[in-house]
Amino acid sequence: MDALSSDIRVAEMIDDRSADGIFRVDRDIYLNPEVFEAELKAIFESNWIFLCHESQVKKPGDYFAAYLGRQPVFVHRQEDGGLKGFLNACSHRGAILTPTAQGNAKTITCRFHGWTYKCSGECLRIKEEEGGYGKDFDRSVYDLREIGAIASYNGFVFGSLSAEVQSLEDFLGESKAFIDFVSHQSPAGLEVLPGSQKYIVGGNWKMSTENAVDGYHTSTVHRIFASTVKQREVREGYEGMMRTETGRLSKKNVRNGCYDLGQGHMVIWADRDPVSTSPLSEAEERLEREYPTGKVNWMLRRGRNLIIFPSLMINDFAATQIRTFRPISADETEVTIYCLAPSDESKEARYARLRKFEDFFMASGMATSDDVVALEATHQGSHARVVKWGEFHRGLGSIIEGPDDVAEEGGFKPATSNTSWDHETLYYSFYRRWRDQLAAVRGE
Amino acid sequence: MDGSILTDNLSTLVDDRVDEGMFRVDRSVYIDESIFEQEISNIFEKCWIFLCHESQVANHGDYFWTEIGRQPVFVHRQEDGSLKCFINACSHRAAILTPFRQGNAKTLTCRFHGWTYKCSGNCVGIKNEEDGTDRSRFDLREIASLASYQGFIFGSLSADVPALDDWLGAAKIWIDLMAVQSPEGLEVVPGSSTYKTDGNWKLQAENSVDGYHVSTVHRVFAHTIAARESKGEYTGIGKTESGRISGGVPTASYDLGNGHMAIWAQHTTPEARPIWEARERLKNELPPKQVEWILTKGRNLYIFPNVMLMDNPSTQIRVMKPISANQVDISVYCVAPKGESTKARAGRLRKFEDFYLTAGMATSDDLAALEDTHEGSMARSAKWSEFNRGLKSITHGADADARELGFEPQACTDNWNHEVLYHGFYRHWLRMMKGEFQG
């Protein structure tokens, strides 16, 4: 680190004068390792962070290993059906306890020196305990350390290293409606399908977060995806939900928009064109019976990308996906993706969902690879520090304070709405929250 | 990063309250890069560092390239039979001079611009030299200290080090127990294996004298060997005695001072050891206690900070080179008594491969455990690793075995499962980190 870097003030890195038509961020926020350290402390290691979906830890003993910032943790389903989150480190030498990233174990035995813990975290056995510590030894001091807070909303499990956090529902705020739009799709609930993919992006995590709700890049970066898919469908005669609706990638008359949901949560949306391509379209009649049309419009007839601050993406477009961003360094981000689906959909719908998941979202697919190139190019370009600012001005002229007409029918209240998913006003509360949390931890 | 660790803060990393039953180490010592930087400057560049064994540079012109901390150096056998050690960097543009890790060259010519140096380090050739150049200004730079003990060569970038004998102290007799196994001395068998571990070097140091992990991590090794041997294909020296692994044999651990540590465990089938064939000769040549230790006690010795000598199923020199807080480079060599029978050598090599090579059945399990431990140390909300096993059975100074063999440890316990030997390691580590160690 150079000596000058300690002079940074994060409050000055967000030039927030939207009333004067200016909202811009200092590109050093993507590059500076000191900023990165502050992010880990202020956000990832003291905030609600998504851990896993309940369907990944269904039965007693099911565990799921994840990270809170750089700290390894795991979620463990208890005998009584409750969930606990523990630091994933043996109390003895700190070895990772979970043998695989996901699995089932009623007790976990450390593979290094054989210490055993119950599902509850209780230290049950210490190899050669008496020979090491004598009689009357209090083994309970070695119980596993629980994380500060764990809670779930509609099956999405979040954890925090700090116990001093607002309630999960308060934290999620207006984003809850968008979680509902996914999780209410089936009375049987959602399930994360087996399998996942991880890849590393050579770029800052905030760029991945921005990109997840950036409608503006799609007609450029995913133009080839759209034309390839279209050609394939014509040539191979794809029908119904096997088709990928590409209208929103190429046409101008598909309605779309974006919301700053407040508290750093953001969403973009676009009308499906046509709706029949969605695997959920098979449930249209049931949904109409169960929910008001306004809500069905949001569940079925609009594709949506949601970011929950800071690093969880839930999206329901070509397929349905959970995507998480794990910051490795200022310059590197680990991305993990899962396909998420209504538990009781038909085989045909599941098949179509999976094929479209592969097409778009996998690193080996035809869209994500283009995103990764764009993100790495952006990270690299940010090193041209003579150009200091990245501006977020698109749509400042059309910003709507509060909900627009379609938000009303969905029953949620965004901080601001805007008329196009090309617009950039949705990022404001994200960067304001980012700034405030970092400034607090740095004592600015 | 919190910025560099100040000397004042270093003490807080080692919570040394043995009187109150507590010795623990802040897990940031394994993951903090600023601590690592200070280890390079205050430990690796100040300490005696193991370089190589004399058998690796036996003849005039033989060289061996290794690293002291992060600085490349090479040992070069001189015409008069003595040894010198140079910084491995051409005086011109600093290119590495030795074409291989190990080789023979009476003169070394830099492959970049062709400058040539004699074995003595004198610069004897500068390509297209201008008249009147004072070539001696470009002689190679020798390292500050170089010495060897029983064929084990150590060097230091610092001139301000204790005499090597004093530094090794109580560890010397443990080296002797290997070196005296043949009147002709030891030889490093050709070949080596080098691998990187994604974990801190101190985890590897701890692991080399950690008897407690053996019955867990190497259980599969023991089972596999036992199953293989039960099929009757392996007999005599071909057998690997795995009694130690399943436990129940006498063992002990020692804090040898200056950060050196050792453990031993009693062999259940000493006749499986390659040295067993020399037992009668040894009895004639050496004091009975030494013979007993050589034949019947499997031993792991750790010499602070970078070398381990193992005499267990096979015999090994293991050398560590720290790369970053998160990575260490490890090289393993099989070391053997000169003149042993072909049968003994074959048994030794096969067991070396079985246990110590990364392609073997034990080291790969160690690495998984060490990488898991490094990764788990990132869970900083669980701050401490305790080293309290065996606190109640500690003996200060020598136990009966140590007295009889003739060495004076700082402390010992009667079980290799115990952790008090690490107290000496971390106390010495702290002294050097704070710059308080005087030779």
Image: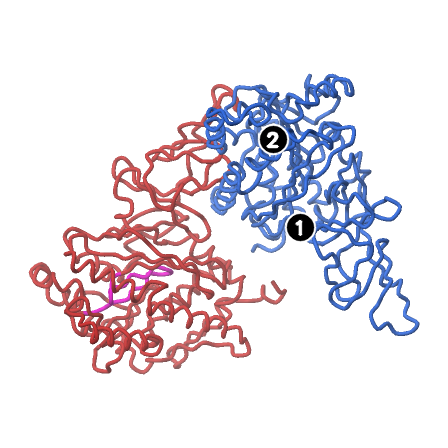
Say which amino acid is labelled 1. Gln
Q: Which residue is mark 2?
A: B347
State the image coordinates of residue A186 (x, y, percent, origin top left): 15, 55
B400 lies left or right of A424: right
Residue occupying the far right of the picture:
B132
Label 1 in the same subunit as label 2: yes
Nearer to the camera, A401 or B51: B51
| The chain coloured red in the image | A
What amino acid type should be assigned to the residue bearing mark 2?
A: Gly
Q: Chain of mark 1?
A: B
Q: Position of residue A75 (x, y in %)?
A: 34, 44
| Residue A256 appearing in the image | no
Position of residue A201 in the picture relative to residue B166 (left or right): left
Q: Main secondary structure of the magenta part?
A: strand
Residue ID at (34%, 79%): A220
Is residue B234 covered in magenta?
A: no
For the C terminus of chain B, the quadrant is top right
Q: Looking at the image, can residue B419 be seen?
A: yes
Position of residue B121 measured from the top left corner of the image (x, y, whole percent): 84, 56
Secondary structure beneath dot 2 equals: helix
For chain B, give the colour.
blue
Q: Which residues are magenta?
A: A302-320
Q: Quadrant of residue B131?
A: bottom right
Left or right of residue A113: residue B151? right
For label 2, count other residues whose C-alpha is less than 10 Å away and answer few (under 14), some (14-19) or many (20+). many
Q: Quadrant of residue B280?
A: top right
Within 10 angstroms of label 1, few (less than 14), some, or many (20 or more) residues? some
Is A389 situated above or below B213? below
Residue located beneath label 1 in the image: B38
Tally the marks: 2
Regarding mark 1 in the picture, which secondary structure is present there?
helix
